[in-house]
């Protein structure tokens, strides 16, 4: 019986655990290698694979210092590095469209104003933004986006003129 207990202790799966290393990680902060560390890792290759599995991704909610990172709660689309640096993150509502179907954030998206009046039609320019999260709502699709300061100001002005529509992923 003692040998069984000792064998169980020795062969217990001590797979690496990814933990936030230094600080709280805010929502939509792209995780880097300096944000995470491995605890209880025995195999350097497995530990490196676990770290690589979260680097370049972000959570939509804050991750507290020392908390285990749940990879299933991180972004699933294209991995990022410094693309969001200097961009403002904000939420806005888009009209429902099939353009967003099946695409996992983050991705670049073109959106355009659907003006309410003919005079506002001249202001219809395509805005290129990053979509970081999207959620369906009864009256549209709420998206969390990242854009430059100029895009933010233009989009804020456009919201009073009409509705925003996704026109397709940006290249």
Image: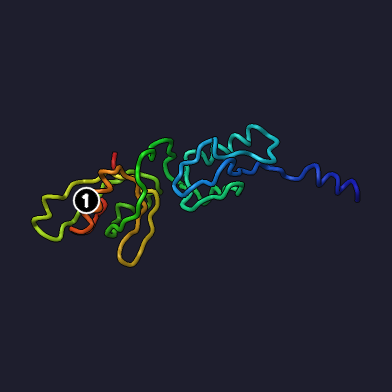
Residue 10 percent location from the top left of the image: 80, 42
Identified at 50% across, 41% down, the residue is: 31
Q: Give the camera-side residue of 158 and 41.
A: 158
SS label for mark 1 = strand
Identified at 20% across, 53% down, the residue is: 113
User: Which residue is denoted by mark 1 in the rendering?
Assistant: 112
Taking the image as shown, residue 157 lies to the left or right of residue 34, namely left
Residue 97 percent location from the top left of the image: 28, 57
Identified at 36% across, 44% down, the residue is: 107
Q: Give the camera-side residue of 76 and 92.
A: 92
Quarter of the figure that contains the C terminus: top left
Q: Is residue 105 above or below residue 46?
A: below
Residue 118 percent location from the top left of the image: 8, 57
Identified at 35% across, 49% down, the residue is: 145
Taking the image as shown, residue 11 lies to the left or right of residue 169, namely right
Taking the image as shown, residue 81 lies to the left or right of residue 44, namely left
């Amino acid at each position: 019986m003692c040998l069984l207990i000792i064998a169980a202790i020795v062969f217990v799966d001590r797979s690496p655990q990814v933990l936030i290393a230094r600080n709280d990680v805010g929502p939509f902060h792209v995780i880097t290698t300096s944000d995470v560390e491995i605890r209880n890792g025995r195999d350097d290759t497995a530990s490196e694979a676990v770290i690589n599995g979260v680097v370049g991704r972000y959570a939509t909610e804050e991750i507290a210092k020392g908390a285990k990172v749940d990879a299933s709660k991180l972004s699933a689309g294209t991995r990022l590095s410094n693309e969001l640096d200097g961009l403002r993150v904000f939420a806005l509502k888009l009209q429902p469209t099939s353009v967003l179907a099946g695409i996992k954030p983050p991705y670049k998206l073109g959106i355009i104003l659907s003006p309410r009046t003919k005079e506002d039609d001249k202001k219809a320019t395509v805005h290129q933004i990053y979509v970081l999260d999207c959620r369906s709502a009864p009256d549209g699709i709420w998206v969390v986006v990242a854009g430059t300061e100029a895009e933010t100001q233009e989009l804020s002005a456009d919201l009073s003129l009409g509705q925003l529509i996704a026109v397709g992923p940006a290249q």
